[in-house]
Amino acid sequence: MNQIHKFTSSRLFSLLGSTRKARIISASALFLAVCAFGAAGVAPLAPDASDLPVKTVQESVVAPDLAPQINALEQQSSTAQFVHEEKIRAGDTLATLLTRLGVDDDAAENFIKKDKVAKGVMQLKTGKRVQAQTDDEGNLQWLRATVVDGKDDPVTNIKVTRKGDGFVATAEPAKLERRVEMHARTIRSGSLYAATDSNEDGAKLPDTIVKQIIEMFSTNIDFRGDLKRGDTFNVVYETFWQDGEFVRAGRVLAGEFTNKGTTYQSVWFEDPQSKQGGGYYSFDGKSLKKAFLKSPVEFSRISSGFAMRVHPISGQWKQHKGIDFPAPTGTPIRAAGDGVIDFAGTMNGYGNFIIIKHWNNYTTAYAHMSRFGNGMKKGAKVNQGDVIGYVGTTGWSTGAHLHYEFRVGGEAKDPSKMNVQAQAPLTAAEMGRFKVYANDMMHRFALLRPAGGGGAATRVAAK
C-alpha cells in the first residue's frame, strides 16, 4: 500500500511539473477544473422555451408631431451665421478684402466707402486684422477693425453693424494693454536697420522705435558713416496690444548705444505725481532736451528776423517782434517747448493764433495759421515737437508763413539771444522718484549686456 501511495505521489508530481512554480500553476488549474465539473453536476437544467406560457399584449402607439422640430431646424438653417477673419495684404482694395471675408453685399460695400466713420477701414495697414460676420448668403451682419493713425494718435475700434435694411458705423477708443519690452542688438554689417530687422531674440524692432533710437543718439553718432561692426545697443520701449494682437509701438523708455568703444545713455522720465519732466535725461537726472526748438517749422528759412523793418502792409518803420518762417500752406507747426495752451483762437492781425505758456514766465506765440492742430484749446498740455497747427496766411499777412514770438513776462525777446533751459530742473522730490525709475532701467541694461561685458567709456546722449 505504501508503494502504491509513493507511486501515485511521484506520478502526480511528475504530472504537475518539475519546478515549484510549475506545480503551483498546474495545481491551480486542476482545482478550477474540479470546481467546474462539480458546479455542472449540481446546476439545474433550464426549462424548454416551448413549454413557457405566451401572453399577447395589444396597445395603440401615437406617432409624435415632428412639424415644430422641422420648422425650427429650417429656421435655424436659414439664419446661419459665419464669422471670418482676415489680415490686410499689400495691394488690397475694399472689394478684395470683403471677398476674402465672405461678404457678398453691395450695400455694405457702398456704405463703407461713403460713411465718414466706416471708411476708416480703408486706411488699415498691411498685417492688421479685420473680422466680419455674414449669413449663409454673404450678407454682412457686422464688421470690425482697429485703426491706428500714428504713434501718438488714439487707437480706434471701428464697427459696422446691420440695422434693418441699412447699416450704422461706430468708433470708440480701444482698450489697450501696455507692455514693456527690452532687446539687445549687435551691429554686424555696418547697418542699423540690418541689426533691427534681425531676429536675434525672436523679435524685429518696430520702425517707429528705430527712428526714435536714431533721434536719441544722432547728435553723438552719424548713423550713415560712424557705425562699426561690433557696435552694440540696448533699448527698452513700450508696446500696446489688444486681444493678444500687437497694435503699435510706443515710446523708447531708455536706450544705450556703444559706438567705437564709447557708450551713450538716455532715459525717458515724466514724474508720475507732478507730471513734470516728460523728456530724456542722463542717468544723473540732467535734462537732455534742447532749450527751445530753433525753428518751429521744419526745413524753413527765415524771411524776417527780430529787428527794425518796414511793415509789409502798413509801410511803417517799426520793430518786428518775432521771426517769420516762410513755408507752404499746410506745413506743420510744432511747439517750441513743453507747456500749456494759454490762448487758441483769432486775434486781430495775428489771424489764427496760439500762445503757449512755459515754465519760468516764458511764453511762445504762433500766428497766421491756416488751422489749429487736434485738441488745441486753452489748458491743453503740449510737449516739445507736438504739432499745434499748420502754416497759413490768416490775419495781416502777405503770404504763407509762420510768425513766431518768444516772450519773457509777456515782452517779446529775440530768441537767438536768449540762453534758457527748456524746462525747470527736477525738484528734490522729483529727483528721488527719478533715481528709483533710472535704477530700474539700469538693471534692465545690466540684464541685456553680455556676461563679462564692459570696458567702454560712458557718456550721456546729447540732445
Image (cartoon, helix red, strand yellow):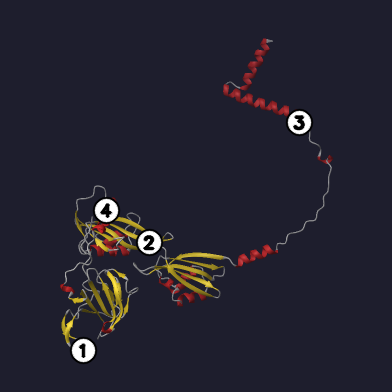
Amino acid of disc 3: Ala
Of tags 2 and 4, the one toward the viewer is 4
| Vertical order, 456 against 360 (above or below) | above
Q: Quickly name the residue at label 2.
A: 240
Residue 21 percent location from the top left of the image: 57, 24
Tell me where residue 271 sits by quadrant.
Answer: bottom left
Q: Earlier in the sequence, mark 2 or mark 1?
A: 2
Disc 1 crowd, CA 10 A, few/some/many (<14, 14-19, 20+):
few
Tell me where residue 48 sits by quadrant.
Answer: top right
Amino acid of disc 1: Ser
Residue sitting at x 50%, y 65%: 84
Q: Earlier in the sequence, mark 2 or mark 4?
A: 2
Q: Secondary structure at mark 3?
A: loop
Q: Earlier in the sequence, mark 3 or mark 4?
A: 3
Q: Quickly name the residue at label 1.
A: 314
Of tags 3 and 2, the one toward the viewer is 2
Disc 2 crowd, CA 10 A, few/some/many (<14, 14-19, 20+):
some
Q: Earlier in the sequence, mark 3 or mark 2?
A: 3
What separation in Å lies between label 2 and label 1 (alpha carbons)? 54 Å
- In the image, taking residue 63 as reference, residue 242 lies left or right, namely left
| Vertical order, 49 against 17 (above or below) | below
**Mark 1 and mark 2 in contact (Cβ < 8 Å)?**
no
Q: Earlier in the sequence, mark 1 or mark 4?
A: 1
Residue sitting at x 54%, y 65%: 82
Of tags 1 and 3, the one toward the viewer is 1
- In the image, taking residue 242 as reference, residue 457 lies left or right, namely left
Amino acid of disc 4: Asn
Q: Quadrant of the C terminus?
A: bottom left
Q: Which mark is residue 355?
A: none
What separation in Å lies between label 1 and label 3 (alpha carbons)? 133 Å
Q: Quadrant of the N terminus?
A: top right
